[in-house]
Amino acid sequence: MQHTAMIQSWGRSRYDFSWETLRSFLDGVSPIDLDRLALQSRDEAYQFLVQYGYDLATPSEHHDAWLVFREALEYLERVICPAATPLDRAVSMPEELHQIADLTEVLLLASHQSPLQPWACALLRVMHTISHANHAVRSPFYTEIQRQILERYRQHIQQDSKGKLHLGSGLLAVPLDDIQLREEKSRDSLILKLLHKPDNVAQGVFDRIGVKLVTPSKVDALLVLKYIRRNHLAIFANIMPGRSRNTLIDLERFREVYESISKPGSQGNFKSNWTALQHPSEVQEAHQNPHSSRAFRSIQFTCRQLIRVPNPQYTALAELRAQLKQRLPGDEVNQLLARLEADNPEPVLRFFFPYEVQILDQENHQRTQTGESSHANYRLRQLRTARRRVLGGLLGDPL
């Protein structure tokens, strides 16, 4: 009987599937969209953390994990839990989460039914997002990356005696109402974006560095794009497929009107044909960012720029060679140098880094300041999506 009971118990254990976590493997469900974990013991939770990237037995990794935990608690309380507007529902995080002294406890709470289980899941969703954000920003070359990308555009910005901005100079200069160069997304904005992104992957955040160009008219927006192409500020071969969006102007109709008014004797102009040049609303909706207002229109694309930075390892080895030659006998130095040069690093590191370009006319730029298309309302829509995703059923029924 005992043997039979053991076999039955083994059979139940063997087929005790964690249906939720299997969805990550089979359906590609993001880990922050799972309702629970399936960890049964503290040792299993510890091993999970090790494979995730934090070995709590290693002091530096233990320290990093606790920094993530504390930032996630703070972000939950400061950004996610408060009501976004009087029409939204505020929630209060249980004090017990602040009392956790072992990070494996968070994983176990998220795995077993209790009043704290949904809160542990909410906390882990934010922790996972912050961990990804940390890996996205850790680059010893980030300052140089910013400089190389944005300096290309700064060099082409001119200001005349009346204070008017232009892209370029001379007869081919394009008038600008404004230019904004973003060197880094704020920490809160990066975390919020990751929380509402379907794939929740920091490597998919392409607008950490960005260029926004505001023109007097929609035709000027196309002239800016033409200038960027002709002066190789962005190389068309490095535009990321699937990351371009044009909701500003109907390019085919623009071409038709341009060719028509360019004919000898033509009396037409862009102004008289402008209504027909507007980008069709149905095309705009097909490419719409779910958090953008349907009234907002722009040209937007993501470009990868090749970055070149001196390889610090190569420099360090060069200095080491020089020191060895001064301090050791010739034969001994030659033997050591031969071993170093067998795996000699490249003197320059080369890699691509993405950045976003947005071009819009003054009319649409004004829409970003107030009303439905404003940045504040855009962020509010992002925040509401993130709150629903992180808190789930903790928000209760919509008010």
Image (tube, rainbow, N blue to C red):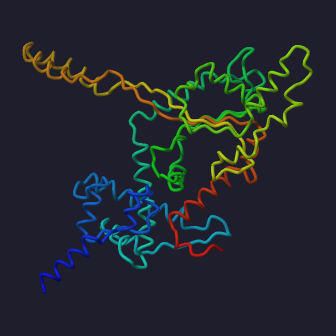
**Measured along the vertical axis of the image, is residue 271 above or below residue 367?**
above
The quadrant the C terminus occupies is: bottom right
Tell which of 122 and 93 is nearer to you.
122
Residue drawn at 28 percent across, 60 percent down: 48
| Side of 115 relative to 374 (left or right) | left
Quarter of the view holding residue 161: top right
Residue 163 vs residue 190: left or right? right
| Residue 321 coordinates in the image, percent (x, y) | 20, 19
Toward which corner of the image does residue 179 lie, by quadrant? Answer: top right
Is residue 202 shown above or below 56?
above
Residue 230 in the image, given as x and y percentages of width and height: 63, 19
Classify residue 372 as left or right of residue 32: right
Tag count: 0
What residue do we see at 84% from left, 22% from top?
260
Residue 188 on image: x %, y %? 53, 52
| Residue that appears at 65% across and 45% down | 287
Report the residue at 38% width, 70% height from top: 110
Q: Position of residue 275 (x, y in %)?
A: 85, 37
Q: Nearer the viewer, residue 129 or 164?
A: 129
Front residue of 4 and 21 = 4
Q: Quadrant of the N terminus?
A: bottom left
Compared with 390, 60 (above or below) is above
Q: Quadrant of residue 59?
A: bottom left
Of 342 and 39, which appears nearest the observer? 39
